Amino acid sequence: MTDQKLREAQMQFSSASSIKPHFEDAINEVIAQIERQMQGLTIDFAQVFLTPHFRVAAPSLAKKLQATLAPKVLIGCTAESVIDRRHEIEQIPAITLVAAHLPEIEIVPFKLQTMNWTELLEKAEAFQKAIPVPDHTKLFVLLCDPFTTPVEQVLNAFNTFHPNLPMIGGLASGSHRPGGNVLFFNDSVINNGAVGVAFAGPLEVDIIVSQGCRPVGRPFTVTSVRENVVQLLEGEAPLKHLQRLISDLSSEDQDLLQHGLFIGRAINPNEETLGRGDFLIRGVMGLDRENGAMIVNDHLSQGEKIQFHLRDANTAAEDLEMMLTPQMLYDPPAGAFLFSCNGRGTRLFDYPDGDISTLRKVVGEVNLAGFFCAGEIGPVGGKNFLHGHTASLALFRPMTIEENLR
């Protein structure tokens, strides 16, 4: 087999970015970087993220990428800040792109634009018609406009109609109004709904959802709740439990509590021991001083287990590093996608490149593209959820011979 034939048979990712302030200069730089890395390989998939500075040029960008790189499938969106393989590029004009040569892997794009969301999301036939899923699907990637997409209902539909299939992605964060974001779908752009792809075939995908929190105190059972208002934990007002917890915390943790309190919803309440990774993290929006009730950014159920959580920069970095450490046992990934909360970056860490520096420290430099999202999508406990303050990461590798024979 010639060297070229060998290259064509192997999975390869390339990535590029530009911070040039003029669109033509920026996109030409990105294209040149990708062409230099791919050296004539077919690009089966590409994902692009760009800051709002380039929003009006998005249609030209889609056409130019198709005319030069000719990706078979292209998705992307506008974002307040973007991420490349070395840096988190915040609050300045920037474009980042990841391109992949994926032999033998089936990539099926889809877009969701409908006024009748109820029919689409509640009827299996309509949903499966809109989103054809190939056999041996390993991963969905979904990018949504937050103003026009009922994201949690969409995720519920995927969990119902395609159970146990993981999804990763994020909500476009480049605009504060409906119609202000742009989504890329092959050679076209849209400003509402969602776009995505299904990946199927001989590939391995490791998904890491780092919620960046640590539990404090002990788990409690919810004994009275009305939608998102928790009235009683084990027969007593949540505020009373919290007051006792505060007295047991260190002064450092008490300070953290002043800047934000979270609860973790146990994914599997039957687990005897609960720790990091066993909870779906949700924010505490307030406490009622009169009756001691707790208002949570989610709807809870009576009988489920919850535990108070704290978050800070050190915990966020430690959590991501802990979740990445098992990756050191394997060959380096071929490529990755990273979806990080727009509350992370230098809003959380007191240094730049917080999440990407942790990834490079543990795994090494990986060809990837990502962005700071208005909400991150990722699986916890076998179900896909919408998160906040999270880093959601997908790492791609070719399937080993042993795995392929199973």
Image: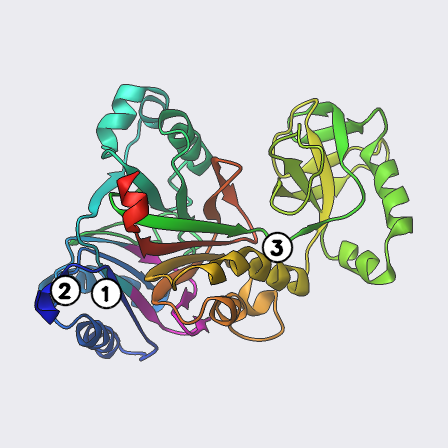
Is 148 above or below relative to 329?
A: above
Q: What is the span of residues highlighted in magenta in the rendered image?
A: 76-97
Q: Nearest the camera: 4 or 59?
A: 4
Q: Is residue 174 left or right of residue 45?
A: right
| Helix, strand or loop status at disc 2 | helix
Mark toward the viewer: 2 or 3: 2
Q: Position of residue 334 (x, y in %)?
A: 32, 62
Q: Is residue 80 visible?
A: yes
What's the residue at 54%, 66% (across, down)? 345
Q: Amino acid at mark 2?
A: Leu
| Helix, strand or loop status at disc 3 | loop
Q: Which residue is mark 1?
A: 57
Q: Is residue 343 visible?
A: no
Q: Gap in Å between the C-alphas at discs 1 and 2?
A: 38 Å
Check the picture and name the quadrant holding the N terminus.
bottom left
Q: Gap in Å between the C-alphas at discs 2 and 3?
A: 41 Å
Q: Earlier in the sequence, mark 3 or mark 1?
A: 1
Is 124 above or below relative to 159?
A: above
What's the residue at 18%, 55% (across, down)? 44
What's the residue at 38%, 39% (across, down)? 149
Residue 212, numbered circle: 3
Q: Earlier in the sequence, mark 1 or mark 2?
A: 2
Q: Is residue 64 left or right of residue 266?
A: left
Residue 145, numbered circle: none
Q: Amino acid at mark 1?
A: Ala
Q: Position of residue 157 (x, y in %)?
A: 39, 28
Q: Which residue is mark 2?
A: 6
Q: Amino acid at mark 3?
A: Gly
Q: Earlier in the sequence, mark 2 or mark 3?
A: 2
